[in-house]
Image (spheres, rainbow, N blue to C red):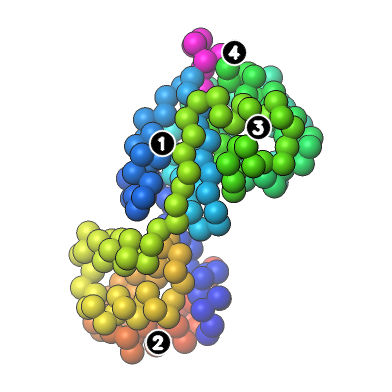
Amino acid sequence: MNQQLLLEVIPAPSPTLDDTITGQNAAALAAAKTLAPGRAMYLWGPPGSGRTHFLRAMCADRSSVYVDFSTPGPDILDLATGGRHGSHQLIAIDDIQRMSPEQLSGVFALYNHWRESSSSSTAFALAVTGDRSASAMDMREDLRTRLGWDLVFRLSPLSDEDKREALQSYTEKKGLPFSAEVLQWMFTYYSRDIRQLFALADALDRYSLSHHRPVTVPLIRTMLSDRDFLKSHDS
């Protein structure tokens, strides 16, 4: 059974801000945890810097709407006019650099709506991500300006050492008896995505308990080739 199939059938746990690994992003994480209605945040960074993770984790902590490039332009505009805003505390817009001109027009209107309502009882927080700084964005000037209206943070990818420490901390926190050899194998031969590593740790724990065997490197290889186990996750 190949690794890609395992990645597909063992989903990563849903992100939360409390289990977000800080790395060099401590200031951004602190701001994300306290982003109140009436405030806005623009998070930018290269692929692998955790932009989507941050937004999804922020959405998990409060009533929210998540928007990305797959959201139709009219739906974004509807949010801007209050039609879908309702009582949501946060509107999160992911990967703005991938949006069409129609979608960007909706985001522009949404920024205006956010500012107009910021001191009212209908105020909401606005969080937006992109892959580069606002000044480097290839989009209409009035929207680029709005990206910098409030808080702006550059996200840095986690270092390998950050990921190693995060994986060890995760297994220790859950009481998983993983040896240094097992942790090294996971980090060396599996995905470098920290959420996928967490998911593998959870799957290994379940597999070892069901087979009454300790978690070892041979057990990992056995699990990777156990089609019945993988099918049970895929169903």
Residue 118 in the magenta stretch? The answer is yes
Whether the residues at callouts 3 and 2 have beta carbons within 8 Å, the answer is no
Give the residues drawn in magenta, as a range.
Answer: 116-124
Dot 1 amino acid type: Ala
Instruction: Name which of mark 3 and mark 1 comes first in the sequence.
Output: 1
x and y, in percent, of residue 12 in the image? 45, 61
Instruction: Name which of mark 4 and mark 2 comes first in the sequence.
Output: 4
Q: Which residue is label 2 attached to?
A: 221
Dot 3 amino acid type: Arg
Within 10 angstroms of label 1, few (less than 14), some, or many (20 or more) residues? many
Instruction: Name which of mark 3 and mark 2 comes first in the sequence.
Output: 3
Relative to 74, is 137 above or below? below
Q: Name the element at disc 3.
A: helix
Tell me what residue is drawn at x 62 percent, y 26 percent.
Answer: 146
Q: Which residue is label 3 attached to?
A: 144
x and y, in percent, of residue 15 in the image? 42, 50
Q: Which residue is label 1 attached to?
A: 32
Within 10 angstroms of label 4, few (less than 14), some, or many (20 or more) residues? few
Tell me what residue is drawn at x 26 percent, y 82 percent.
Answer: 181
Whether the residues at callouts 4 and 3 have beta carbons within 8 Å, the answer is no
Specify the label residue 116 is tagged with: 4
x and y, in percent, of residue 118 in the image? 52, 15
Dot 4 amino acid type: Glu
* Residue extending furthest toward the top: 120
Q: Determine the image quadrant of residue 103.
A: top right
CA distance separating discs 4 and 2: 57 Å
Whether the residues at callouts 1 and 2 have beta carbons within 8 Å, the answer is no
